[in-house]
Image (cartoon, rainbow, N blue to C red):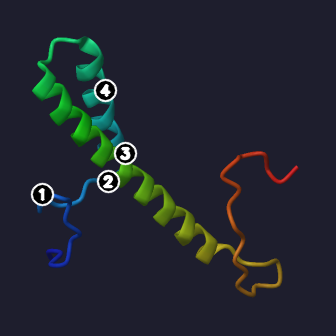
Amino acid sequence: MTRTSEPKGPKGEAAESYDQAVARLEKVVAELEGGGLSLEQSLEKFAEGMGLAREAQRKLEEAERRIEKLVRAADGSEQAVPLDPGGDGGA
């Protein structure tokens, strides 16, 4: 069975997974840091990197929303528990 409603990226291609977006972003950053690009190429790479960063952020936010929906209280009732993006565990 094929997926007919697969999300599309900004250029119409199938949206990348988070890991794919991050891997591509790392490659773009390395190309920019390499210094061998013209100004125009650098601008294109920068724009691509910004799009990839936004896509990765969107996917992280989507994952946080999904996790909030999945968390259940000890008595089995559903309970939305916001994630702590600071990572201090609420301490």
Q: Residues within 10 Å of mark 2 (few under 14, many from 20)?
A: few
Residue named by callout 2: 17
Q: Amino acid at mark 4?
A: Val
In the image, what residue type sits under mark 1?
Lys
| Residue 86 image position (x, y, % from top left) | 70, 47
At a point 15% along the width and 78% down the height, the residue shown is: 4
Q: What element does badge 4 sit on?
A: helix
> Position of 90 compared to 19: left or right?
right
Q: Earlier in the sequence, mark 3 or mark 2?
A: 2
- Count residues near mark 1 (Cα–Cα under 10 Å), then give few for <14, some for 14-19, many for 20+: few
* Residue 11: mark in rendering: 1
Looking at the image, which is closer to me, 40 or 75? 40
Q: Quadrant of residue 40?
A: top left
Is 21 on the left or on the right of 89, as rendered?
A: left
Question: What type is the residue that disc 3 sits on?
Answer: Ala
- Disc 1 versus disc 3: distance between alpha carbons? 15 Å
- Residue under pointer 3: 53
From the image, state whether disc 4 or disc 2 is nearer to you.
Answer: 4
- Looking at the image, tell me whether mark 4 or mark 2 is earlier in sequence order: 2
Q: Pointer 3 and pointer 2: residues touching (CB < 8 Å)? A: no
Q: Residue at x 62, y 71 (%)?
A: 68
Q: Earlier in the sequence, mark 2 or mark 1?
A: 1
Q: Mark 3 falls on what kind of element?
A: helix
Residue under the image location 19 percent in, 59 percent down: 10
